[in-house]
Image: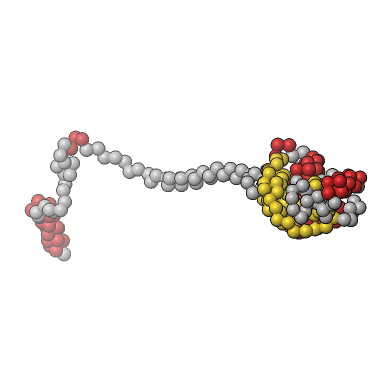
Amino acid sequence: MRTLFLLLLLANLAFFAWARYLTPPDPYSDSRPRERQVAPQRLVLLPARAPSAPSAPPPPPAAAPPRPAAATSPGACIEWGSFTLADAERAEKALEPLALGARLARHRVEESANWWVFIAPQSGRQGAQKKAAELKALGVDDYFVVLEDGRFQWAISLGVYRLPDAAQERLDALRAHGVHSAQIGQREAQVQKVWLQVRDADPQIRARLRDVAKDAGGTELRACST
């Protein structure tokens, strides 16, 4: 038993000496890595860094500034007519409560009038003057005596109109004043008429214009032609 123990001890010593001094070095290991570096005196070992905190997400983009509201478009241009010069003055007075100021203007046009309200030709100048005096006594001032040669000479014209409805309304108004000899006829003629233009008319003004025009027979409202 003792001999076996000595043999094992000698074998261990021999293996240690062989492994320590006789085996070739491992080609993949380096026992002196620092000494083999280029300029080893400059090599600095840095401590491990702690993981950095995740960066905060970028702030959301600023909301776009609100767009300015669209400017309020100006009101419409409305014209009311058409009138003779005498009727235009009365129509302007009817619009005075609206306090339109510079927004109210006259627009003169030449229209083709196919309908007129008239009193048949009288027997000469004296007969026409007598009929004119009767009209004034009844409170009718808007008329003129036809002087031009032809079959209507010495007739009394009480208004010319583009539309037959307007002529009928004029006739009804005259009969309400007691003028029973007036009648409606067709007569093509170019006449000077007036349209009253109201610029920058907002919805409230347009509503009031409709009310005024409704009370004045034989007129119409429309968008301005110019």
- Regarding residue 177, the answer to whether it shows in the image is yes
Residue 157 in percent (x, y) is at 79, 50
Residue 107: name its quadrant.
top right
Q: Left of 197 or right of it: where is 24?
A: left
| Count of picture labels | 0
Judge from the rendering whether residue 47 lies leftward or rightward of residue 26; answer left or right.
right
Looking at the image, residue 136 lies above or below residue 119: above
Where residue 90 appears, as percent x and y from the top left, is: 80, 43
Front one among 195 and 104: 195
Q: In front here: 107 or 160? A: 160
Q: Is residue 139 visible?
A: no
Residue at left offset 75%, top offset 59%: 186
Q: Quarter of the image containing the N terminus?
A: bottom left
Rendered residue at 14%/63% (across/down): 4
Q: Quick one: which residue is furthest to the top in this view?
A: 41
x, y percent for residue 65: 55, 43
Residue 115 lies in quadrant: bottom right
Foreground residue, 209 or 113? 113
Q: How is the image coloured?
A: secondary structure
Q: Residue at x 46, y 45 (%)?
A: 58
- State the image coordinates of residue 2 (x, y, percent, origin top left): 15, 62
